[in-house]
Image: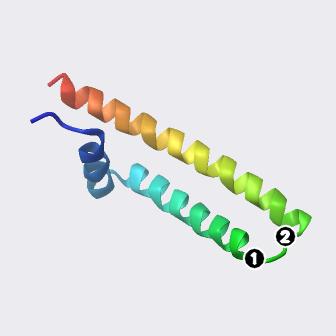
Amino acid sequence: MPITADDVRQSLLANDPEYRHLEDEHSRCESQLEEILRAPYHSSEDLALEVNLKKMKLRLRDRMELIVARHHHSLAHR
């Protein structure tokens, strides 16, 4: 049975502290972003924070996907 990227993610969450940290940070950013978006009014600071959180989430996701790809590649070549 082929190993999927989701299988690799689950394994990394269980066994890789760096990946788990990135996932935690991504979730924290998502929570903050949801809080901002729920507010009925947005200040200029809120809008700037929203943009920064979205950029941070993308950077974190890119790093996480790089780790997944590296592990997936190494597992496929065993």
Whether label 2 touches label 1, CB < 8 Å: yes
Left or right: 11 in relation to 70: left
Left or right: 76 in relation to 38: left
Q: Is residue 73 above or below residue 7?
A: above
Q: Which residue is mark 2?
A: 42
* Residue 72 locus on image (x, y percent): 28, 33
Q: Residues within 10 Å of mark 1 (few under 14, many from 20)?
A: few
Left or right: 46 in relation to 65: right
The residue lying toward the viewer, choosing from 57 and 21, is: 57
Q: Residues within 10 Å of mark 2 (few under 14, many from 20)?
A: few
Residue at 68% from the left image edge and 56% from the top image edge: 53
Give SS at disc 1. Answer: loop
Left or right: 68 in relation to 11: right
Colour treatment of the image: rainbow
Q: Amino acid at mark 2?
A: His
* Residue 51 locus on image (x, y percent): 76, 53
Q: Quadrant of the N terminus?
A: top left
Distance Cα–Cα, label 2 vs label 1: 7 Å
Residue at 53% from the left image edge and 57% from the top image edge: 26
Q: Which residue is mark 1?
A: 39
Q: Quadrant of the C terminus?
A: top left
The residue lying toward the viewer, choosing from 5 and 19, is: 5
Q: Amino acid at mark 1?
A: Ala
